[in-house]
Image: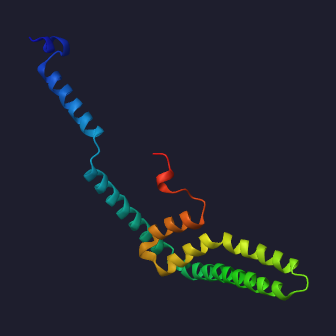
Amino acid sequence: MSIWGRIFGTSQAVESMVEGVKSGLDALVYTDEEKATEAAKQRTEARAMVIQWMQATQGQNLARRLIALVITGVWVLQHLAGMLLSVISIWARVPTPYETSARVISESAHQMNGAVMLILGFYFAAPHMGSIAEAALRRFGTVPNRADKPA
């Protein structure tokens, strides 16, 4: 019996150990092809989940549309009111109250930008919603860029 045979018992034990090391090393290496395959699988599963969710909640479509219209309407009215008050403050004898109101209303409208962009994106660009949501949150929200997140 060789020295390996004495240490590990039999040649079968040595072979099983070599196979274990080989499979362990293979698991350590995550190739680009494996990453791409896994990412594609995850995207497919996510899309299927969204489709199932939309089918399951189809009865709520009217309520969703009403909420979307109300939120978008409030946002538009805030922007219009802010602009109108800004213009009125130009000709007012005491412009400070108008300027203050315009600033407060405009800031409130600005805080709604992220939500409204998601609503508009959902209704007008549903197939591209993932990238739109990310871009909108990066642009108008407080969510950090993916590259900024620790790995």
Where is the N terminus found, in terms of image quarters?
A: top left
Direction from residue 57 to residue 103 in the image, left or right? right
Location of residue 111 with respect to 35 vertically, above or below: below
Location of residue 11 with respect to 112 vertically, above or below: above
Q: How is the image coloured?
A: rainbow
User: Residue 138's spot in the image, x, y percent?
Assistant: 54, 63
Identity of the residue drawn at 15% across and 26% down: 15
**What is the tally of numbered marks visible in this picture?**
0
Identity of the residue drawn at 50% across and 50% down: 149
Direction from residue 20 to residue 66 in the image, left or right? right
Foreground pick, 127 / 13: 127
Direction from residue 150 to residue 88 in the image, left or right? right
Location of residue 140 with respect to 74 vertically, above or below: above
Identity of the residue drawn at 78% across and 73% down: 104
User: Residue 116's spot in the image, x, y percent?
Assistant: 60, 75
Direction from residue 1 to residue 87 in the image, left or right? right
Foreground pick, 68 / 6: 68
- Residue 76: quarter of image: bottom right
Foreground pick, 12 / 73: 73
Where is the C terminus found, in terms of image quarters?
A: top left
State the residue lying farthest toward the left.
1
- Residue 20: quarter of image: top left
Identity of the residue drawn at 17% across and 15% down: 9
User: Residue 37's spot in the image, x, y percent?
Assistant: 28, 56
- Residue 68: quarter of image: bottom right
State the residue lying farthest toward the right.
93
User: Residue 44's spot in the image, x, y percent?
Assistant: 35, 64
